Amino acid sequence: MTLFQRGGTYERISKADAGDEDGVVRQGEDTAELAERRGIPIDGRRFRDNDKSATHGKHRPEYEKLMAAVQRGEIDVIIVYMLGRLWRNRRERAEGIELLRKHSVSVLCVKGPELDLTTAAGRLLAGLLGEVDTFEVEQMSEREQREMRQRVERGEVPTGPRCFGYTVDGKEVIDSEAAEVRKMYEAIAAGASLSGIATDLNEREILNRNGLPWTHNAVRYLLQNERYAGLREYNGATYTGKWPTIVSEDQWRQAVSILTDPSRKTSPGPARKWLGSGLYWCGICDDGTTVTSAQAGAKVIKGVRYEGARAYKCRGPVKHLMRTAEPIDRLIAGTEPGEPLGLVPQLLVREDAGQLLRDGERPDMDELNAKAAVLRARLKNMTDAFADDDEADALEFKRAVRRVRDRLADIEQQMTSPARAAVLGDLVRSDDAVAAWAALPLDRKRAVIDLLMTVTVLKGRPGRAPFDPETVRIVPKDA
């Protein structure tokens, strides 16, 4: 029997439930018993990786410490439960065998032979046993992959952590969460930022699936998750699932397109807190330089900072513009009771507000407008004729009107810009556009303003003169 003087044990288990160490503890008991039976001193040289796979060469801190001890000459035999606990992939096994050969270290298995890696026969046996272990792992992986592909092809619900908006088993929708998911997709389509969406959720105390506040990255991950559209991607192919959807495939693909657009700013940065910060232009530079937020009249007295009124100032190197923010924002977006409506809500309550959705870049817009005008005139004539004809058939009249209205709706749909509809559609179609506008989160309001107009802040009147709307230049953007 070989007399070893510097033994070390190593235990590892690939998967363990949270906090469960029973598997490696049992291995440790068996390796310790073998060391005692063979009279091999361990003296604290015990190394244990719990819940660590060795198949793909992932980081195993205790294994690395074991190999470092081998190189320092502190170990002449490694005791393991079985060889597969030490190595599971070819590269790591080849490197390990060579390292143990170089330092004259053997391997002793509770379930397996003693391997003297200083001999060609010992290295051959270690390699053969290792190949059997690798074969078993690869064969199991092939079975699991085939089973997974079959589950995907059948449209079965994905396993794993609960998906926000779905029950734990993924087969049913949680209505309150699903409503928030839809709002997120609508918000990103309407021009909201990820940080803005997360801020809105957190301000309304809507927590994520783990009961924690939202981050911009969590919102991004959710919006790019094809599961909400009833889809599942596997090995580059997309399959249709059999669980209930929360958004349409078109909505999901639109969100992914927006988030993966190379021109989109990817740095999260802080969410905007003011309506015009980074959106309004400086009229002194008059070169498109935007204004940023500030606190007018802010002072520090005896180490205490006293904030002044909100203000906008030029972002350029010369701070030649400082304007109080409140009257400018009120001019653009105001909905205060008793005060005049801001320019944006004024546009939304007009009878022709639907024109805001028009796609001005369509080459056939004049033709479509003409067709729509003819159909509207026809509807009016039909209504007048029906009112004057006491013997008219009401059912026949309703059918005729429905056909004309369907044709008109089709033409109006062709005239609508998808991008404008995403930003403005819910506002234009609302029964109370002013209330709908007032209820929008800041990001959405900014997106609407950016779509409708260019706001340029000019120099204010000298002294304490009242706010003059003429000191803000508004240029509508063509529909």
Image: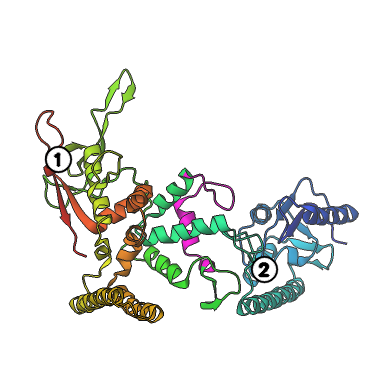
| Residue occupying the point 26% across, 31% down | 309
Given the current orientation, which residue lies at the most extreme top position? 302
Q: Closer to the observer: label 1 or label 2?
A: 1
| Residue occupying the point 14% across, 42% down | 469
Please give the residue where the numbered disc 1 appears in the rendered image.
Answer: 318
Magenta span:
204-228
| Residue occupying the point 72% across, 52% down | 47
| Residue occupying the point 27% across, 75% down | 388
Q: Quadrant of the C terminus?
A: bottom left
Circle 2: is it few (<14), some (14-19), or many (20+) Cα within 10 Å?
A: some
Tell which of 395 and 359 is nearer to you: 395
**Helix, strand or loop status at disc 2:** helix
Query: Is 62 placed above or below 147 here?
Result: above
Residue 181 in the image, given as x and y percentages of width and height: 50, 59
Tell which of 43 and 235 is nearer to you: 235
The label number, if any, that marks residue 93 in the structure image: 2
State if disc 2 and disc 1 touch (CB < 8 Å): no
Q: Quadrant of residue 380?
A: bottom left
Sequence order check, earlier mark of 1 and 2: 2
Residue 352 in the image, given as x and y percentages of width and height: 24, 62
Query: Is 152 placed above or below 258 here?
Result: below
Query: Is 26 placed above or below 311 here?
Result: below
Given the current orientation, which residue lies at the most extreme front position? 390
Q: Amino acid at mark 2?
A: Arg
Residue 213 in the image, given as x and y percentages of width and height: 52, 46
Q: Quadrant of the N terminus?
A: bottom right
Residue 184 in the image, given as x and y percentages of width and height: 45, 57
